[in-house]
Amino acid sequence: QVQLVESGGGLVQAGGSLRLSCAASGRTFSSYAVAWFRQSSGKEREFVVVISGNGRSLNYAESTQGRFTISRDNAKNTVYLQMNGLKPEDTAVYYCAATQRVGVRIERHEYDYWGQGTQVTVSS
C-alpha cells in the first residue's frame, strides 16, 4: 500500500506558477504510476497528467500540455507538478493518485490510492 499527501496549492494570479508535490509512503514507490487529477466546483474529477513508475512515460491532458510538467524523484518518494501560465479555469482541488497497473492510465477507477487534495485558486 501507499499513502499520498499533496502540498503546494495556493492562490495565484493568472499567468503565475505553482509547484505541487505529492509525497508517498512505502518502499516500492517506483512500482507505482502516479497521476494528478483535479476537480472544480460542480464538475467531475478530471485527469490532468500521469507519469510511469520509472518516469519514462508521460501522458498529459490536452488542456494542460505545454503549461504543466510532471516529474518524479523516486529517491524522495515524491512526484511534482510544475504549473506555469495558470488560468482561472485551472482553479480546482488537485489530487494525486497512484496505481500499480501497467501503463499510463487516465481513468479515475484505475487508481487505487488517493491523496486528500490541495486547493489551487487562480484569480483573473
Image (cartoon, rainbow, N blue to C red):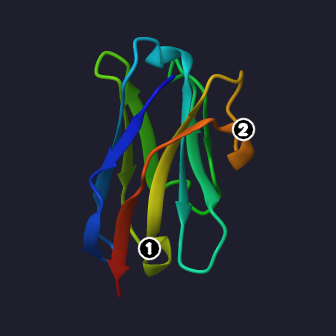
Kindly state the secondary structure of the residue where label 1 is placed.
loop
Badges 2 and 1: C-beta atoms under 8 Å apart? Answer: no
Residue at the image position 45 percent from the left and 19 percent from the top: 29
Quadrant location of residue 53? top right
Left or right: 115 with respect to 44?
Answer: left
Label 2 vs label 1, nearer the camera: 2
Kind of residue at badge 1: Thr
Q: Is residue 57 visible?
A: yes
Q: Note whether 111 is above or below 64 in the view shown.
A: above
Task: Look at mark 2 in the image and give the residue it sits on.
Answer: 110
| Foreground pick, 49 / 32 | 32
Quadrant location of residue 115? top left
Residue at the image position 70 percent from the left and 44 percent from the top: 106
Which x, y percent locates residue 30?
A: 48, 16
Which x, y percent locates residue 73?
A: 34, 24
Question: Sequence order check: which comes first, mark 2 or mark 1?
Answer: 1
Mark number displayed over residue 33: none
What distance separates the C-alpha of mark 2 from that of mark 1? 24 Å
Residue at the image position 44 percent from the left and 73 percent from the top: 91
Residue at the image position 37 percent from the left and 19 percent from the top: 74
Kindly state the secondary structure of the residue where label 2 is placed.
helix
Task: Look at mark 1 in the image and give the residue it sits on.
Answer: 91
| Foreground pick, 62 / 100 | 100
Which x, y percent locates residue 84?
A: 36, 60
Q: Where does the C terminus fall, quadrant-wise?
A: bottom left
Which x, y percent locates residue 76?
A: 28, 22
Q: Is residue 14 visible?
A: no
Left or right: 73 with respect to 109?
Answer: left
Quadrant location of residue 105? top right
Badge 1: residue crowd in 10 Å (few <14, some 14–19, many ≥20)? many
Kind of residue at badge 2: Glu
